[in-house]
Image (cartoon, coloured by chain):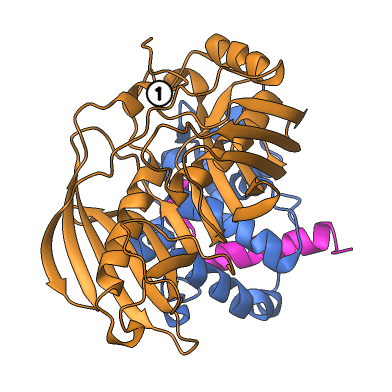
Chain colours: A orange, B blue
């Protein structure tokens, strides 16, 4: 056990309503002194709240690992100092899988919605100590954990190997051999978080979209992501070939087909829709807050 | 084997919606979903895809499909021990499986067959039958 457990990749620090296998409400205070909190981590926070309600429902025999998200809607962004109000509503939960909807709000304003998410359940003891998890859940429900332990994660670097401006991009992502988040995700078996992969893929898609002539210099931002599917575990030191193929939709949005492959095998895939607001011209590496979203 | 019989007409009645649901889950064209294609060998489906398809079919048809239902149906009135021994399907089990998965060509049933390899036999028709049986067992409210 290291000091990174429940710190380096844990995004629920208080649970205020809890009905195992049914629903949970909780919160996460984003530390004010970190650099950024990407949208993919907001989705992770919602998923983690659902995971607590699912694990408790099956007496910590299993935990959801890897995932499938039918649709994620991005309504706004979160930043350092914000408090995420998290909601997870489970509509199926057994030893095989958990299925849920969820959302995150900031000061009553919805910033993200997750629709029809699915997590296959795997033996919890392969990944973490079930007793430690039970104790953690008791703490989260009994007043909450001490906030501020998350120290931020620097955007993962990638090497662009091919680029057709405004249309497509290929890049290599070298998953780190070691990182604090691996100690938390998970202590007994490090798994590269799907949401960190998604964050990298969103950044790549935004990078390609900036060269789309019809945007005329406006900054694109994610609107929704569909068909997110993790097909296998991604482990430390693994090298992934990432692909983005961008097309313009008839409604003016941009659709990005995202892929992550290793050798011949697709390990993850998703579709991302981007839009741009003319008034929103600030340059940023991440999604940009737009009040009307 | 007290299985609810399913006719070819009933299978074809649900097939278009099943095919559309599967294509969306697998990210392929609906034209690729032929009734008898092996989902794993022909369409590269993996275990997460099966989970995805079952949940999507539940939503699309407003039915409930318990996880592991295909193998449970195939096993019929056999006990688990009669159906498999140490992860290998018994001869009796194989006979039940052949009957339940009657749409699958005989040469695709390997001997010995591991329980873990049974999903390799599944085709869109397998899922159509699952949907029809679920509809008959518990008609949508």
Q: Main secondary structure of the magenta part?
A: helix
The answer to whether B133 appears left or right of B52 in the picture is right
The answer to whether B36 appears left or right of A138 in the picture is left
Q: Is residue A263 visible?
A: no
The local secondary structure at tag 1 comes to: helix
Image quarter hosting the C terminus of chain A = bottom right
Q: List x then y, in percent, for residue B41.
A: 34, 60
Q: List x then y, in percent, for residue A256.
A: 36, 71
Q: List x then y, in percent, for residue A205.
A: 31, 65
Residue shown at 24%/44% (left/top)?
A: A156
Q: List x then y, in percent, for residue A140.
A: 64, 20
Q: Is residue A290 magenta?
A: no
- In the depicted view, which residue is nearer to us: A3 or B44? A3
Where does the magenta region start and end? B118-141
The answer to whether A79 appears left or right of B128 in the picture is left
Q: Residues within 10 Å of mark 1 (few under 14, many from 20)?
A: many
Q: Chain of mark 1?
A: A
The relative height of residue A265 versus residue A60 in the rendered view (above or below) is below
The relative height of residue B98 versus residue B24 in the rendered view (above or below) is above
Image quarter hosting the N terminus of chain A = top left
Q: Which residue is mark 1?
A: A184
């Amino acid at each position: 056990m290291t000091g990174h457990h429940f710190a380096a990749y844990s995004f629920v620090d208080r649970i205020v309503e809890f009905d195992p296998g049914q629903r949970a409400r909780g919160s996460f205070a984003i530390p004010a002194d970190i650099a950024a909190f990407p949208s993919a981590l907001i989705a992770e926070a919602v998923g983690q709240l659902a995971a607590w309600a699912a694990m408790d429902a099956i007496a910590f025999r299993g935990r959801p690992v890897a995932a499938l998200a039918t649709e994620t809607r991005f309504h706004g962004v979160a930043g350092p100092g914000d408090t995420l109000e998290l909601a997870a509503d489970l509509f199926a939960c057994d030893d095989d899988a958990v299925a849920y909807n969820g959302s995150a709000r900031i000061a009553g304003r919805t910033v993200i919605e997750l629709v029809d998410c699915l997590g296959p359940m795997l033996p919890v003891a392969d990944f973490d100590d079930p007793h430690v998890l039970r104790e953690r859940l008791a703490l989260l429900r009994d007043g909450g954990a001490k906030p501020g332990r998350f120290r931020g994660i620097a955007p993962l670097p990638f090497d662009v190997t091919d680029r057709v401006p405004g249309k497509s991009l290929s890049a290599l992502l070298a998953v780190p051999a070691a990182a604090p988040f691996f100690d938390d995700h998970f202590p007994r078996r490090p798994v590269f978080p799907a949401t960190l992969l998604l964050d990298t893929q969103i950044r790549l898609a935004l990078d390609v979209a900036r060269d789309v002539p019809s945007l005329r210099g406006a900054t694109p931002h994610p609107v929704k992501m569909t068909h997110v599917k993790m097909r296998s575990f991604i482990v430390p030191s693994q090298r992934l070939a990432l692909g983005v193929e961008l097309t313009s939709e008839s409604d003016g949005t941009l659709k990005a087909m995202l892929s992550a492959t290793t050798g011949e095998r697709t390990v993850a895939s998703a579709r991302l829709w981007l839009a741009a607001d003319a008034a929103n011209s600030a340059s940023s590496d991440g999604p940009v807050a737009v009040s009307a979203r | 084997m007290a299985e609810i019989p399913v006719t070819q007409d009933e299978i074809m009645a649900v097939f278009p919606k099943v095919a559309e649901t599967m294509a969306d889950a697998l990210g392929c064209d609906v034209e690729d979903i032929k009734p008898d294609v092996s989902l794993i060998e022909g369409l590269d489906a993996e275990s997460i895809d099966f989970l995805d398809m079952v949940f999507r079919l539940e939503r699309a048809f407003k039915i409930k499909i318990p996880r592991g239902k295909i193998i449970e149906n195939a096993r019929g009135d056999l006990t688990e021990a009669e159906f498999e021994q140490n992860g290998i399907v018994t001869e009796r089990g194989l006979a039940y499986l052949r009957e339940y998965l009657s749409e699958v060509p005989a040469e695709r049933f390997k001997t010995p067959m591991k329980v873990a390899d049974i999903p390799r036999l599944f085709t869109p028709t397998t899922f159509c039958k699952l949907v029809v049986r679920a509809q008959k067992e518990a008609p949508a409210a």
